[in-house]
Amino acid sequence: MNAGKLKRRAVFLRPVKTENRLKEIETQWEVSTQAIVRLSPMSSKEYFANVQAKASITHKIVMRYQPGITALMKVMMDGRHFEVMAPPIDVSDRHRELILLVKEHV
């Protein structure tokens, strides 16, 4: 992992289910952790492979390994919102680098 390419601060939000006065379950988002990450758009080859698989992945986030990052989380960075679309990929299972496949909400 080239740590010099990690340049953006990301905030990871996790869902918290609460019950309102009408006994309805609501999902609220609370800050789970922050990290310095690299955000890169999917290459055209990867993008078209995802289109054929009917996935809507638009970007890839690379970061140092942090336990607790899940596919249920959302990511906020620079005023942009991303939804994690797949379980995090622990590169080589060495707990050094995570890759997140995300979809940007416009």
Image (spheres, grey):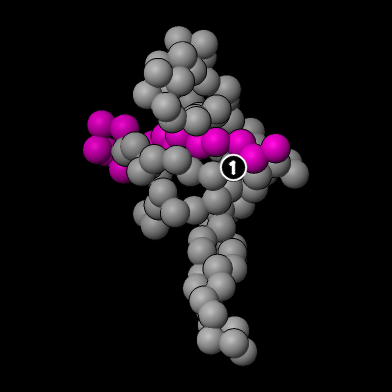
In the rendered image, the residue lying farthest to the left is 93
The residue at 51%/14% (across/down) is: 43
The answer to whether residue 67 is above or below residue 25 is above
Q: Position of residue 85 (x, y in %)?
A: 45, 40
Q: Nearer the viewer, residue 15 or 11?
A: 15
Q: Quadrant of residue 30?
A: bottom right
The residue at 40%/52% (across/down) is: 70
Kind of residue at disc 1: Phe
Q: Quadrant of the N terminus?
A: top left
Q: Position of residue 10 (x, y in %)?
A: 61, 46
Q: Magenta segment, which residues?
A: 91-106
Give the class, few, some or many, for how many residues have Cα within 10 Å of label 1's Cα (few <14, many ≥20).
Answer: many
Q: Which residue is mark 1?
A: 82
Q: Is residue 28 left or right of residue 84?
A: right
In the rendered image, the residue lying farthest to the right is 79
Q: Nearer the viewer, residue 51 or 6?
A: 51
Q: Nearer the viewer, residue 17 or 68?
A: 17
Q: Magenta stretch containing residue 98, yes or no?
A: yes
Q: Position of residue 32 (x, y in %)?
A: 53, 62
The residue at 37%/24% (across/down) is: 53
Q: Nearer the viewer, residue 59 or 24?
A: 24
